[in-house]
Image (cartoon, rainbow, N blue to C red):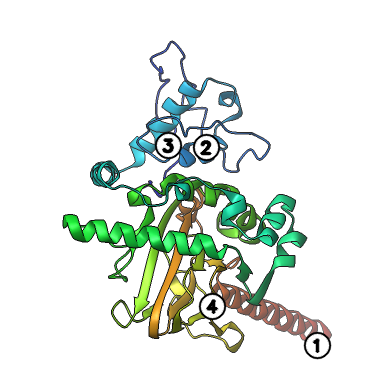
Amino acid sequence: MSLDTHKRPNGNGNGNSTGNGVVLPTQVTHRLRLNPSTDHNPESYDDLQLEFSPLLFSSLERYLPPSMLNLSRDSKIQFMKDILVRYSPEGERTRIQKHREYRQKIISNYQPLHRELYTVNAAKFFVPSFLKAINENTEEGFRNIWVEPTPGVYVFEMLQPNFCEMLMSEVENFERWVHETKFRIMRPNTMNNYGAVLDDFGLETMLDKLMDEYIRPMSKLFFPEVGGSTLDSHHGFIVEYGVDRDVELGFHVDDSEVTLNVCLSKQFVGGDLFFRGVRCDKHVNTETQAEEILDYVHVQGHAVLHHGRHRHGARATTSGHRVNLILWCRSSVFRELKKYQKDCSSWCRECRREKKERQRLSITATKLELLKRDRISAS
């Protein structure tokens, strides 16, 4: 599992040698940039066995000081690793290592049923309208393929039926292997007792590409306030609902900046999603406004893209078997900056309401003060 957060250097270190003769800039005068270098094309780290996600290094590279951008990849890796290791608790690194060993044990023993799923084949995976919008990569192009039934929730056709069936078949094959080998697996999260983590049996690379090349372009345009342009890690999984599975899902928010939810099955009744507005931690339990209420009916191959902090849940699946692909997309950069963020009004509706109320009260107080001064002057 990829590291979710990292911190900037504190500026107290000395110069570091990479071990290959290159001396890195001192942290006293060289810190990570506050804003990314948008015109810098970062290195690819996919070919390396690193302690952290390759996408994390690519994302963090855009925040390196200008003097480091032209150094060798090895130099940049060492500098970024030092930062990540310094600010990653030892217990977290141990957990990551154990999970990597757990995942490797599964991949070494599980035989995939559909190997074509493990690399992205765009023409076979996605519907033409979605691919057209991705290739155009414009706000107008994306708005042409989706509807926005409530602010910040985007619904569009995405996956071909054959891909949906193939992915469900692969998950069934994995679950059959788990049952036959009595292998104890981790479920997607604390809310779901059924389903599987796709990253754990070899689909991590495919999902990385899905996030990087297909979800991030949309998120960059429509979720910039929560790091939509810097998504660098994910948690991909399948959830299953039915009378012999989880029946419903309670009111919650996701551990993500942006969530992709795609329905894979079609033989089911119920299971509607309900949305109730975006909230920060402080306001997660506040009242829902009428315009924030949305109930959504699943359709096979159709995706829902929404803010991870958009409060939602799933109603009971009363018959059949509902299967959904969920991709929690995360930005380690946003998570770091969020620690210092005092104003969430750019994305939390309740923060926005409170901010407007403070502004209204301030204007009212100023008017009263001016009227008071006018009366004094007149007298």
Residue lying farthest to the right in this orientation: 378
Q: Which residue is mark 1?
A: 379
Q: Which residue is mark 4?
A: 277
Nearer to us: label 2 or label 3: 2
Q: Position of residue 248 (x, y in %)?
A: 36, 81
Nearer to us: label 3 or label 1: 3
Instruction: Looking at the image, tell me whether mark 3 or mark 4 is earlier in sequence order.
Output: 3
Q: Nearer the viewer, residue 268 or 225?
A: 268
Instruction: Looking at the image, tell me whether mark 4 or mark 1 is earlier in sequence order.
Output: 4
Task: Tell me whether circle 2 and circle 4 mark residues in contact (CB < 8 Å).
Answer: no
Nearer to us: label 4 or label 1: 4
What number is the disc on residue 10?
Answer: 3
Task: Tell me whether circle 3 and circle 4 mark residues in contact (CB < 8 Å).
Answer: no
Amino acid type of the residue that numbered disc 4 sits on in the rendered structure: Gly
Q: Which residue is mark 2?
A: 58
Instruction: Looking at the image, tell me whether mark 2 or mark 3 is earlier in sequence order.
Output: 3
Q: As displayed, is residue 124 above or below residue 81?
A: below
| Secondary structure under the numbered disc 1 in the rendered image | loop
| Secondary structure under the numbered disc 4 in the rendered image | strand
Q: Is residue 183 visible?
A: no
